[in-house]
Image: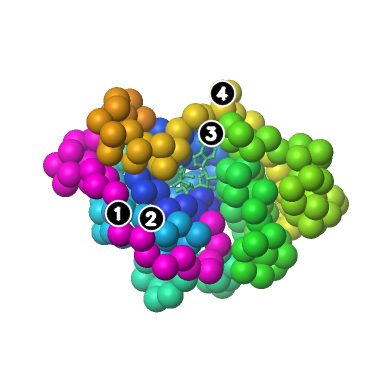
Amino acid sequence: MLRVCFGGTFDPVHAGHLAIARAARDVLHAQVWLVPAHDPPHKPETRADAAQRVAMLELALAGEPGLHLDRRELARPGPSYTVDTLAELRAELGEALPIAWLVGSDALLQLHTWHRWQDLFELAHVVAVQRPGAPIDAAMLRASAPAVLAELDQRWLPPSALHESASGGFALLPLALPRPESSTELRRRIRSGDPWQDWVPPAVAAYIERHRLYREPGAILPPESTDA
Ligand code: ATP
């Protein structure tokens, strides 16, 4: 069965992440593993620590069939390079199992900045999902990420074909509706006292309240040079 990995900072996990993970499970007939990053790659202002981010993911995933948590990046010291994560997975799961790495379209437009990004396709398929403000189409890719467009050129597959090979394809995951949520906007709302509870599962909202997360502007950490 296809294994989908959905990496991110999840600071915090929000309803958009969950809707995308469920869509991947249902449309791709896959098991989906959320993979929280150890360091905040490209994100100097992460505000919850890894243990808190994982605790919120556990709450969000409880009772969600087919959605799982993969803690491997937290156990690895240093930056969380996706290519290293996929190499580990490939070694564990063998050469034949189809693996897909799922990203939002904003991340796809940055893919060429990821460590050894072209090697990702040796290890897995890449699946992208549209995100408001970052439409994936040939014109957009040509304008903002021509190297990514060139790499994807021969790789486009219908989502149903991802099961037929272990790696090397690119597919778009259809979503019934684009998801407006973002962790950045969620943190801003919490800090500003604007309504935010609808954007997370009730148990995650309760955790955020109980731990008083995201209330204050965080310390600025030095940026890490790693993947999104
Ligand atoms: P931030 O606002 O801090 O950048 P985020 O909401 O993008 O956070 P991440 O944990 O960085 O959350 O995202 C993990 C993955 O989920 C990324 O590939 C990102 O593109 C994707 N993603 C997050 N929110 C959405 C969304 N609303 N629609 C589509 N993709 C999304």
Residue found farthest to the left: 210
Secondary element at tag 1: loop
Q: Dot 3 surroundings within 10 Å: few (below 14), some, or many (20 or more)?
A: some
Residue contact between numbered discs 3 and 4, judged by CB atoms under 8 Å: no
Against 65, residue 163 (above or below) is below
Q: Dot 4 lies on which element?
A: loop
Q: Is residue 194 in the magenta section?
A: no
Name the amino acid type tagged 4: Leu
Tag in front: 1 or 4: 1
Disc 3 or 4, which lies upstream in sequence? 3
- How far across and how far down the image is residue 124, in percent? 65, 59
Q: Magenta stretch? A: 202-228
Cα separation between marks 3 and 4: 11 Å
> Which residue in the protein does label 2 denote?
45
Q: In what element is the residue under mark 3?
A: helix
Residue found at x 71% / y 38%? 136
Q: Is residue 87 visible?
A: yes
Which circle's residue, 1 or 4, is located before the other in the chain?
Answer: 4
* Secondary structure type for disc 2: loop
Which residue does the numbered mark 1 point to in the structure image? 218
Disc 3 or 1, which lies upstream in sequence? 3
Image position, residue 206 (x, y; %)? 19, 36
Q: Residue 65 appears in which quarter of the rendering?
A: top left
Q: Quadrant of the C terminus?
A: bottom right
Cα distance in 3D space between marks 3 and 1: 33 Å
Q: Is mark 1 within 8 Å of ligand 1?
A: no
Q: Which residue is mark 3?
A: 23
Residue at image mark 4: 177
- Between the residue at mark 1 and the residue at mark 4, the CA separation in whole angstroms equals 32 Å
First of labels 4, 2 by sequence position: 2
| Main secondary structure of the magenta stretch | loop
